[in-house]
Amino acid sequence: MGRKKGGTNKRWSAQEKYEIIKPIIEGKKSSHDVTRETGLSNGMICNWIKKYRENGIKGLENKRKPGNQLVKYQARKELTEIEKLEYEVLKLRIENERLKKGYTKKEADQAKGKKSSKKNMR
């Protein structure tokens, strides 16, 4: 079935995943029954069950964080005053994280693929 064109992936919390697989773990329903009821793929449900059996509820937590948060501000032409401030705060948080990790501005730019010119090296 898949998602609609232009749609985004749903991010399930660990608790939501557990509520979906709970009847299977307790033996009340089969994975195929839950697949039909929820519309989720059987493979995804089986992966959640496997992760739950290996690591408990911790195994169901999302490992990755959502993508680049700055995109939501960069794509728009005009921002409200609050959005401008939020955008600036996000940029400063990112810069702060890079500095904590020991990156210099030059190293961060190189990691992005930007090449610094000799003029900027002086």
Image: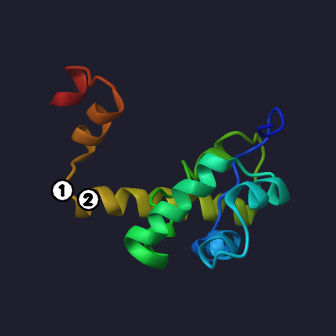
The residue singled out by tag 2 in the image is 99
- Name the amino acid type tagged 2: Leu
57 relative position to 12: left or right: left
Determine the CA span between mark 2 and mark 1: 5 Å
Q: Is residue 79 above or below residue 58?
A: above
Q: Is residue 6 above or below residue 79?
A: above
Residue drawn at x 74%, y 63% is: 81
Residue drawn at x 68%, y 59% is: 31
Q: Measured from the top left, where is residue 58 in percent x and y?
A: 44, 75
The residue singled out by tag 1 in the image is 102
Say whether residue 73 is visible.
no
Return the residue nearer the eye: 93 or 13: 13
Return the residue nearer the eye: 32 or 95: 32
Element at badge 1?
A: loop
Disc number for residue 112: none
Residue drawn at x 19%, y 20% is: 118
Dividing the picture into quadrants, the one containing residue 3 is top right
Q: Is residue 28 above or below residue 111?
A: below
- Name the amino acid type tagged 1: Gly
Circles 2, 1 touching at the beta carbon (< 8 Å): yes
Return the residue nearer the eye: 33 or 63: 33
